[in-house]
Amino acid sequence: MFAFGLFCPWHKELSGGAVSVEATVEELATELSSYLDTSRINQVRRAYYYAEQAHEGQMRKSGDRYITHPLAVAHILAELRLDHQSLMAAMLHDVIEDTGIPKDALADQFGEDVAELVDGVSKLTQIEFRSRAEAQAENFQKMTLAMAKDIRVILVKLADRLHNMRTLGPMPFEKRQRIATETLDIYAPIANRLGMHSISTELEDLGFSSLYPMRSKYISKAIQKLRGNHREIIEDIRGKLQEKLEERGLPGRIMGREKHLNSIYSKMKLKQKSFHEIMDVYAFRIITDNEDDCYRILGAVHSLYKPLPGRFKDYIAMPKANGYQSLHTTLFGMHVNIEIQIRTEEMEHIANNGIAAHWMYKTEEPGVGKVNQMRVDRWVKGLMEMRERADDSMEFIENVKVDLFPDEIYVFTPKGRIMELPQGATPVDFAYAIHTDIGNATVACRVNRNLASLSQPLQSGQTLEIITAPGARPNPAWLSFVTTGKARSSIRHALKTRKRAESMALGKTLLKKSLNGFDTKLSDITDAQKQAVVNHNQVNSFDDLISDIGLGNRMAYLVARQLVAGYEEPEKEKISEAKQIEASGPVMIRGAEGILLKFAACCKPIPGDPVVGIMDSGNGMVIHTDTCSRLPEDDEGRARLTHLKWAKDITDEFSVELRVELERQRGVIAEIANAVAMADGNIERINVEDQNARFGIVSLVVHVNGRRHLARVMRRVRNIRAVTHISRVRY
């Protein structure tokens, strides 16, 4: 349970005390000599002296010279054994922002790679944002672009944030709160996503301590007290575990494992548990030589104490999304629960340092960490896709936060490929995880070979098969149940693209109809006329103007008049020329025009009904029957109606509500259902209302493809002996 030393990258407080800065640089050089050659160490030294000169005269809030900060960041990266370019970028990471030295100058001095790294880490200080949240979101967007070019950007940024969090004390209260919140929201989860557990947990604890200093102090004191009280039990369990390993001849070093402050607080808050309930678990980690030994040690500890059902996780066979591998088991022994993690030395190194454990992916050992690198590349690629589809940086960061990062589940493709998804993910999330095009074309799914709902949450171990259809499109309702950022951003993007295409098509149809009333064709309008109208309406392009018509934000007649006759439209003419609008002929509809043509729920129009359309600002056109009581009755309102006619080859089904009055008899509902089926109708909903002991009323919603079909259904129902009256319901 209690650690014998939590990993903590270089954590010296630098000050203008007895130890000179130059000596500290040499201390760094000594550390680097364990894995870098002399020429590369000298390049790091040169970057340090350049930064020292650039930051001359600048001080930190603590009173230390500013150069102490980049030097400390470089020390953190040296602990992670990063390459010389990352260390040079660490030395120079504030130069562009704070000293006015341009990126080109850094490129000339230290090369393009280092300049790009520094630029990627630099903040967006030149842009003014409407809010602090927007600044954070834009900042993260820029960092994502830089990460896509070089993943080392985020490693330098995390080290920078870690040192800033360690030295947050002298900052004003509000700034401390903001930086700590941003750290917990963005940087700690990113470190976790990259598998960098040590940096992630330290960032979480420092963020927690800054946001809640009293709670942090209380929990810390309680841990110290508990550690003393439970020392004997810890040593006893450790001794028994060591004895069992020696008995079986299994290599392994046993370490106590400490729960960090933020983790304890989060569990107390989310799981509504007391401090003692959470801490009443003794946690150990056993580090061994290879995978086989991991499984043998698992058998050994299970023979020593009884495992708790449902608490075993094999992350070696199925690694987490961030590359983490380990065996987890919970045992019951000595009247307490014992959590044990079993892993190899390499897994331990990767668990602590994640992607930083594989910094050499471009250099000496291309095979090391290849799988983990592929996972990171896949994640960054996913970020880039979400960035391209998002309307703005706020939507982008909202989608990213969804993925930073809940517990995973593991499901299988029909060919046995393992896919990791967040807890609560649905088949639609799975489809988008495979490929965006598959997600967009999804119509159904099979879970363990059985047809299943697209909205049901998945469980680990299930096998999924996605059924697609050509021409299928995402359903807006999917947004209410998908959980992954990729699925959400892909659906929104597809809906936006579809809405734009549909608004353009509808807008063009309506504009052509209005121009016909002026005996003009759209092809007759010159580019100069179009541009003049675009400028007058203050839109970006003529396409945007047409799209606005389709969305219901502008009247087609007014735009047509501007194109033909100029910009001024007296109010009285808008009404008096309604007949001219009608004279231009009705618009053809096919019944399944998409998300911008909706059929009114009040009158439920079907093919064959005389219909009109009324524009709903921002949402397109709503279609009503021309006798609907909800239509406007004043002249100006009637002038805004668009006259429509049905196409002849409509095959879609439409909902109609029927009211059936009948004598109460046994089996009469079954007769009605049978009559609707015999007329090729489909019942959507049926509701029985008692009128009295002899008579009743049935409310029936059926699907038909037009008035003729409806007449056939009503005739069949009317022929039932018990039915006294049937009518179509309109509200």
Image: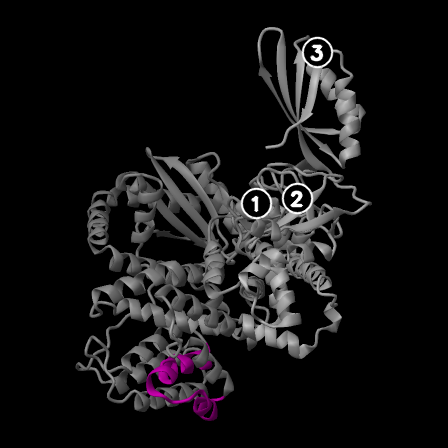
Vertical side of 105 occupied by 211: above or below? above
- Identify the residue at image location x=64%, y=71%: 565
Judge from the rendering whether residue 253 lies leftward or rightward of residue 525; answer left or right. left
Foreground pick, 5 / 459: 459
Instruction: Reply yes or no: does residue 561 show up in magenta.
Output: no
The type of residue carrying mark 2 is Leu
Label 1 CA crowd tier, 10 Å (few <14, some 14–19, many 20+): some
- Identify the residue at image location x=27%, y=62%: 177
Looking at the rendered structure, which numbered label has been put on residue 291? none
Give the mark, 2 or 3, whose residue is nearer the N terminus.
2
Tell me, what colour scheme is on the image?
one colour
Q: Which residue is mark 3?
A: 667
Instruction: Reply yes or no: does residue 84 show up in magenta.
Output: yes
Tag 1's secondary structure? loop
Distance between mark 1 and mark 3 Cα atoms:
44 Å
Q: Which residues are magenta?
A: 83-111
Q: Where in the figure is residue 588, as x and y percent of width and height?
A: 75, 51
Of all residues shown, which one is farthest toward the right? 649
Looking at the rendered structure, which numbered label has been put on residue 464? 2
- Identify the residue at image location x=69%, y=50%: 643
Tag 2's secondary structure? strand
Distance between mark 1 and mark 2 Cα atoms:
51 Å
